[in-house]
Amino acid sequence: MAATFGGLFIAALARGRRSHEHPLQLCALIKAGLLTADEAGWDSTPLPIPGRVQRLLYQARPAEYLRAVESLDCPRGGGPSYFMFKRYIKHWSPAADVRADLMTFAL
């Protein structure tokens, strides 16, 4: 997936949960050269996965996963989107926090 979607996808995953040391992990990914600071600080906010889609994902059946993902309403013409379970969005690191983390860890 990383090869297909690139650094923005990796950065989106690494920005997910501050309480699980994700800011430190994100900085390590930059230091290792896997991501750029621009990718890490991508100015985006995750979109909530709708309940009907979440229920399909929770069934843990590969065929249902594909159906679930195909049913997501992706914004048109606005660039890449990142979907996240609604209960986790409050843990997302906004771009301003990522920039502060980069300064804290001297990157």
Image (spheres, rainbow, N blue to C red):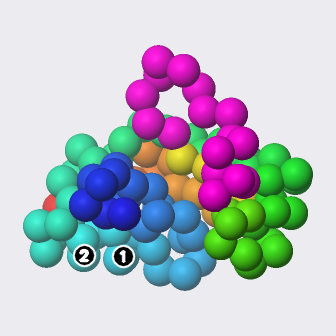
- The front one of 54 and 90 is 54
Question: Residues in magenta?
Answer: 66-81
Residue at 81 percent across and 63 percent down: it is 56
Residue 62 location, quadrant: bottom right
Question: Is 93 one of the magenta-colored residues?
Answer: no
Q: Is residue 90 left or right of residue 8?
A: right
Residue at 74 percent across and 64 percent down: it is 64
On the question of residue 88 being in view, the answer is no
Residue for badge 1: 24
Mark 2 Cα shell of 10 Å, populated few (<14), some (14-19), many (≥20): some
Q: Amino acid at mark 2?
A: Ala
Vertical arrangement, residue 32 with respect to residue 5, above or below? below
Residue 59 location, quadrant: bottom right
Circle 2/circle 1 CB separation < 8 Å: yes
Residue farthest to the top? 77
- The front one of 78 and 67 is 67
Q: Residue 6: x percent and y percent?
A: 27, 53
Residue for badge 2: 28
On the question of residue 25 being in view, the answer is yes
Q: Residue 88: x percent and y percent?
A: 71, 63
- SS at badge 1: helix
- SS at badge 2: helix
- The front one of 38 and 105 is 38
Q: Residue 43: x percent and y percent?
A: 42, 37
Q: Is residue 44 left or right of residue 8?
A: right
Residue at 24 percent across and 71 percent down: it is 29
The Cα–Cα distance between marks 2 and 1, rounded to whole angstroms, is: 6 Å
